Image: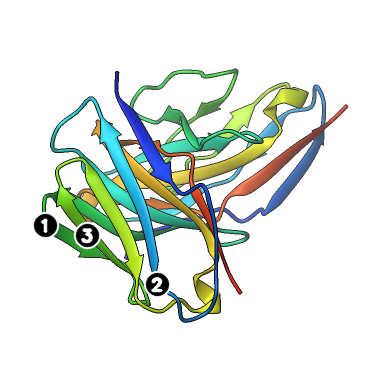
Amino acid sequence: SQTIHQWPATLVQPVGSPLSLECTVEGTSNPNLYWYRQAAGRGLQLLFYSVGIGQISSEVPQNLSASRPQDRQFILSSKKLLLSDSGFYLCAWNPGANVLTFGAGSRLTVL
Amino acid sequence: AQRVTQPEKLLSVFKGAPVELKCNYSYSGSPELFWYVQYSRQRLQLLLRHISRESIKGFTADLNKGETSFHLKKPFAQEEDSAMYYCALSGGTGGFKTIFGAGTRLFVKA
């Protein structure tokens, strides 16, 4: 069956520290992968999406970057976190017909 | 630019009352419209899509291209409908992207 995993589930990091959130998909190949940030009152903001290995499209200029080192792996990173990077990060993949399947999310708190 | 607008952040109704969650969009091309729902302590998941033209959990949504709206409706709200609802748009000139609205929290009171 097809599943999507995200980790860590929660993360508390000091300002200026690096970040790495990982997302993997099982049971499929060459999926379209997405990173969203969910913030209260602002809905779901599309951060990055990828249609293949090494192919990353950035939607919002910011302190974050994404990489896709393997077909079913999508990583969200930052070299130096800001307070404004706090939020709930969701990974998603597109199993077809433009429908998204979401992971459980990673809650990041930057102190 | 593609945009999805959900004007209500919070909607509170009594059980058994009709409910309508509003969604308006702007697009370039031929987008697909969706409603996603997030129940407490659950993952965000698809509720319905305009292409399917089906009723899910008693909810329906009709795409009105003239008014560029895709409002979600249910004639009789239930307490278990309490959740966060997101309207989303995909395709058009955005290609692989799916854009979401700010979301509406529905609270159904007993």
State the image quarter where residue A68 is shown: bottom left
Question: Where does the image place residue A95, in percent across and percent down from the top left?
Answer: 26, 31
Which residue is labeled 3 in the image?
A: A67
Image quadrant occupied by the N terminus of chain A: top left
Return the residue nearer the eye: B66 or A98: A98
Establish whether labels 3 and 1 are both on one chain.
yes
Chain ID for label 3?
A: A
| Residue A54 circle label | 1
Q: Residue furthest right?
A: B110
- Where is B39 relative to B91, above or below? above
The kind of residue on which mark 1 rests is Gly
| Residue under disc 3 on the same chain as residue under disc 2 | yes
Q: Is residue B77 visible from the viewing direction of this image?
A: no
* Chain letter of disc 2 in the image: A
- Taking the spot 19% from the left edge, 28% from the top edge, the residue there is A28
- Which of the two discs, 3 and 2, labels the residue nearer the N terminus? 2
Other residues around mark 2 within 10 Å, as few (<14) / some (14–19) / many (≥20)? few
Instruction: Tell me the distance, in whole angstroms, between the alpha carbons under discs 3 and 2.
Output: 15 Å
Disc 1 is placed on an element classified as loop
Label 1 neighbour load within 10 Å: few <14, some 14-19, many 20+: some
Q: Examine the rendered structure and indicate whether residue A59 appears above or below residue B34.
A: below
Instruction: Kindly state the secondary structure of the residue where label 2 is placed.
Output: loop
Q: CA distance from mark 2 to mark 1?
A: 21 Å
- Report the disc number at residue A18: 2
Q: Which residue is at a point 58% across and 18% down the rendered structure image?
A: B57
Amino acid type, callout 2: Pro
Which mark lies nearer to you, 2 or 1?
2
| SS category of the residue bearing label 3 | strand
| Residue occupying the point 60% across, 18% down | B58
For the C terminus of chain A, which image quadrant? bottom right
